[in-house]
Image (spheres, helix red, strand yellow):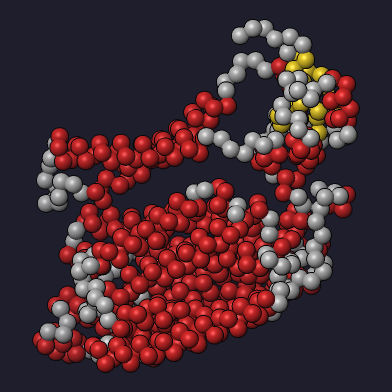
Amino acid sequence: MDSNHNPYTKQLPAELGAPAFVDAWKSRALVIGAIFAVIAVILGFLGQAEDGLGWDHFLRAWTLGTMLTWGLAVGGLALLMVQYCSGGKWGLLLRRPLEALSRTLPVIFVYWLVIALFMKRLYLWAQFTTAGDTAAALKNGVLTEIQAHCIDFKRPMLNADMFWGVSLLCFAIWVYYAVRLNALALQREADAPENTPYWIKKFENISGPGIIIYSITMTACAIYWVMSMDVTWFSSVYGLLFLVGQGYLVLAFCIIVAISLSKAEPFKTILRQTEQHDLGKLTFAFVMLNIYLNFGQFLIIWSGNLPGEINWYLDRIRGSWGIVITLDFIFHWVIPFSMLLSRDLKRNKKRLLRVCQWMVFARAFDMFWLIEPNFKDAARNLHFSWGILEYIAVPAAMFSFWLAYYCTRLKARPLVQVNDPHLEEILEPEHANA
Amino acid sequence: MPAREGVYGLLAEFETPGDLVRAAQQARQDGRRRRDCYTPYPVEEAAEAIGFHRNKVPLLTLIGGLMGGTAMFLLQVWVSVLAYPLNIAGRPMYSWPAFIVPTYEWTILWAGLSAAFGMLALNGLPALYHPLFNAPNFRDGATTDKFFLCLEALDPKFDRAETKAYLEKFKPNSIVEVEY
């Protein structure tokens, strides 16, 4: 349809950059980050004095913060690639916010370095690096027999060199894709509109293989960084759980960004109710897929009831952890599911925003349940200590600092891609092509 | 039902959904209560424009889904705990995780069936006769590429000449008088 002849078409505003209040978000995030960082350090000392685990809890919570922000950065990159392959107007809205997510990888790398440098405190396999070590630890009762066996058996994969090598390789691959897609997006913008078919093909050809490579690298890192905290356990659906979790998190976060930006131009013009509704539906699908995979894993392991597998769940159910998993189920699935079921809610900016904020929290809560029971002092024994509060303070600080950096990335480019055939459609009144 | 005679309404044909929606919105604002839109594919804004926003299908779907899920869960509890208790690998008789998959399937099945049949029950389909099919342009266009607004004669404001002039303002392709 020729938009020039449709008198009801909206006009794109002249100023396409991020509105000024993004700077205010940044300073607010920095202040909140600083406050929580101070609290985290105090809690570290308190925890250390209480049970000698203060800094251990600090590092575990640090892993949670890393996984959360990492999920946003690489998940954003993945959704960007999916969008280049699938097309769709929802993607035109999110393209710049997603690109900005992918450009936060430097922060994630710094976060990850801390994990790598202190790996001895987080991973049993990093403590006992030779067969002699494990044999001695087994004799002293530090390790159980199955743990000693697993550490020895998995040593070719779970050792410091491989940890560094695989992680660095994965970072290199993500950075390559992020840099390439971001640079090409600018070139495309500068090019003539006639060349659009060439660019669409080009982005497709990069993104298609990129999605597959991403899912492999993402799985590898989820296994090294989180799953290997419990050396005895393995699950073939583990990478997929993180993949879906990232979809859940990134969509929720992007809806927050889009709705918050829509208070001013240019998102005021381009965020239509139709696309907001579509994004809500897509998020709903991820809520469903997420519980499907999580429950599927549980059902299979519960049915098998094998000594090698079931302990992972028992560590996370017994000793009051049952309360956490019940809450997790409610936070993570029941609430977003029953809220997003409503059509009116998905079309209401304020309410959808609240649900998406809740979902970001729920994702962090889920990872608390995933991470903390890996450790001997917490498995089958949920108990209060100062250290456990680090799970609030550290991720809050890390997320805030990351968010501040994200705001600078968001400011770096215009928020709307102009050189795209979908732009005309997004400026039309909603019912023109319903 | 007594046989009806006379004019059913005036049918305006539009080329685009946008034109239809604007006309429908205006007609609603002007207090023309008996009106309906006909489009070849769902146009949600048209439904909203004639004030047809709420219906009971979502509620029926929810009730159907909850009933289906509850029924299947209880059926399994009854079978496993009361009717045919079997010791399966030493698990408790009431092993709820194993009941979830059929419960989920029945929730979807009954939600889907309730949505489909609830929709049919509430919208009056299947209808064997509708006066609008007397209009040739409606027969050809309503399922392909034309968008229709019908202002019905039951409306208190309906007047053949006045309503026709009113519809002319929206510049439709044509205005047809439809008989019962």
In the foreground, A95 or B119:
B119
In the foreground, A133 or A291:
A291
Q: Is residue A85 visible?
A: no
Left or right? Give the position of A223 relative to A108.
left
- Can you give x and y, in whole percent of width and height, for residue A125 in the image? 27, 83
- In the image, is residue A343 above or below residue A232? above
In the foreground, A143 or A51:
A51
Left or right? Give the position of A131 relative to A367.
left
- Can you give x and y, in whole percent of width and height, for residue A401 in the image? 53, 83
Q: Residue at x 50, y 60 (%)?
A: A355
Q: Residue at x 48, y 72 (%)?
A: A71
- Can you give x and y, in whole percent of width and height, for residue A417 in the image? 73, 67
- In the image, is residue A123 above or below residue A6? below
How many marks can you see? 0
Residue A183, quarter of picture: bottom right
In the foreground, B6 or A105:
B6
Q: Residue at x 41, y 87 (%)?
A: A39
Residue A148, quarter of picture: bottom left
Residue A126, quarter of picture: bottom left
Left or right? Give the position of A387 relative to A244.
left
Quadrant (top left, top right, bottom left, bottom right) of the C terminus of chain A: top right
